[in-house]
């Protein structure tokens, strides 16, 4: 597994929201491919909040999302621990990303406290981890792995979050040499070229990407909208989201995307409307998405001004004049 490139966190509100959005999505389905990006992303989010110092008023809503995300991680630590174990274990990963001070790097200890283990079993486990670590080190030295599209996508997302878009575009170009027809890489190429002004290249890549989504046009436009939002192209993200909504009006992921774009654009009323629609559509089919939409709704409601009470209706009295005989 190729390790993602570490980048310095962006202290912009846009970068913070993107990082929170990415971490919330990753937590739903953690595995050995994205666990490192998830843990490093949590470090970056923590650093972004530190960058705001004592003045947290500008990120009050984001601070609530961050607290909610940490509570979800604490409530289900095995989601992180199991994924990390498949990638070498939190101890090994933490040593590679020192100082690893966040509690998320030490969730294995929290899980261990809930079990009754003897010192002998602990010693055996440490020895096994050391042996596996040594074997993995030897394997990676003599048989270096070729970066997979998933690894490349993780690196690209980190570069986009830090805003060096030319570097992200270079990473896409490099990844496409080994995966020329990967749909997500093609969309990244199109979206990044849009941002740097390469219109012709963007249109070509977008057309190629669309051909890989045969029979799934809504999924194509939803992914385009998601990537455009990540690079800060909110008008383009909204346009792609509307394309997807026209094709799949009952897709909860589409309405959630549009709600996220509206929230990032400052249209809290429209965002709340889309999140409300997401809650209704997600139902039992996608309960995690429904929970995320409810959480976002909760943060938005205090900032939405209540509608004025309607004026009381006037009572109209009709006087009937009797007709002359």
Image (tube, grey):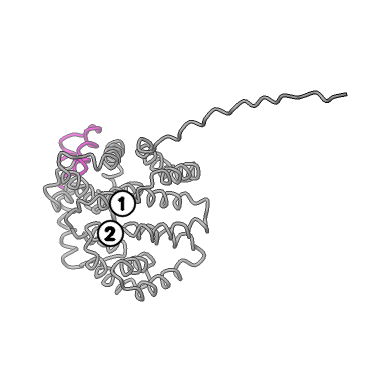
> Going by the picture, which residue comes out furthest to the front?
324
What type of secondary structure mainly makes up the magenta span?
helix
**Whole-Å distance between the Cαs marked 1 and 2?**
9 Å
Q: Secondary structure at mark 1?
A: helix
Instruction: From the viewer's perspective, tell me whether residue 284 is left or right of residue 297.
Output: right
Q: State the residue position of label 2.
A: 157
Q: Is residue 136 above or below residue 214?
A: above
Percent position (x, y) of residue 136? 19, 58
Number of numbered markers: 2
Q: Are marks 1 and 2 in contact (CB under 8 Å)?
A: yes
Q: State the residue position of label 1.
A: 22
Q: Quadrant of the C terminus?
A: top right
Instruction: From the viewer's perspective, tell me whether residue 280 is left or right of residue 113.
Output: right
Which badge, 1 or 2, is on the more N-terminal residue? 1
119 drawn magenta? yes
| Local crowd size for mark 1, using a 10 Å CA cut-off: few (<14), some (14–19), many (≥20) | some
């Amino acid at each position: 597994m190729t390790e993602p490139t570490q980048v310095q966190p962006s202290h912009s509100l846009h970068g913070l929201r993107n990082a929170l959005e990415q971490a919330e999505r990753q937590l739903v389905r953690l595995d050995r491919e994205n666990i490192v990006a998830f843990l490093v992303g949590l470090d970056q989010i923590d650093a972004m909040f530190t960058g705001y110092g004592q003045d947290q008023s500008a990120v009050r809503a984001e601070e609530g999302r961050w607290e909610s995300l940490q509570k979800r991680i604490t409530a289900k630590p095995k989601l992180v621990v199991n994924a990390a174990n498949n990638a070498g274990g939190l101890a090994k990963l933490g040593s590679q990303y020192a100082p690893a001070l966040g509690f998320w790097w030490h969730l294995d200890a929290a899980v261990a406290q809930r079990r009754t283990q003897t010192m002998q079993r602990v010693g055996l486990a440490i020895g096994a981890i050391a042996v596996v670590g040594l074997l993995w080190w030897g394997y990676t030295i003599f048989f270096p792995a070729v970066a997979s599209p998933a690894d490349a996508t993780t690196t690209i997302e980190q570069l986009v979050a830090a805003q060096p878009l030319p570097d992200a575009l270079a990473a896409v170009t490099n990844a496409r040499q080994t995966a020329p027809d990967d749909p997500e890489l093609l969309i990244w190429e199109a979206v990044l070229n849009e941002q740097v002004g390469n219109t012709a290249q963007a249109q070509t890549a977008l057309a190629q990407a669309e051909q890989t989504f045969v029979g799934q046009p809504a999924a194509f436009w939803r992914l385009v909208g998601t990537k455009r939002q990540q690079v800060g192209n909110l008008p383009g993200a909204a346009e792609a989201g509307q394309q997807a909504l026209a094709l799949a009006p009952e897709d909860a992921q589409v309405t959630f995307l549009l709600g996220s774009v509206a929230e990032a654009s400052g249209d809290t009323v429209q965002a709340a409307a889309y999140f409300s629609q997401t809650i209704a559509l997600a139902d039992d089919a996608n309960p995690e998405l429904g929970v995320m939409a409810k959480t976002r709704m909760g943060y938005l409601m205090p900032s939405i001004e209540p509608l004025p009470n309607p004026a009381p209706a006037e009572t109209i009295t009709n006087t009937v004049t009797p007709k002359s005989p």
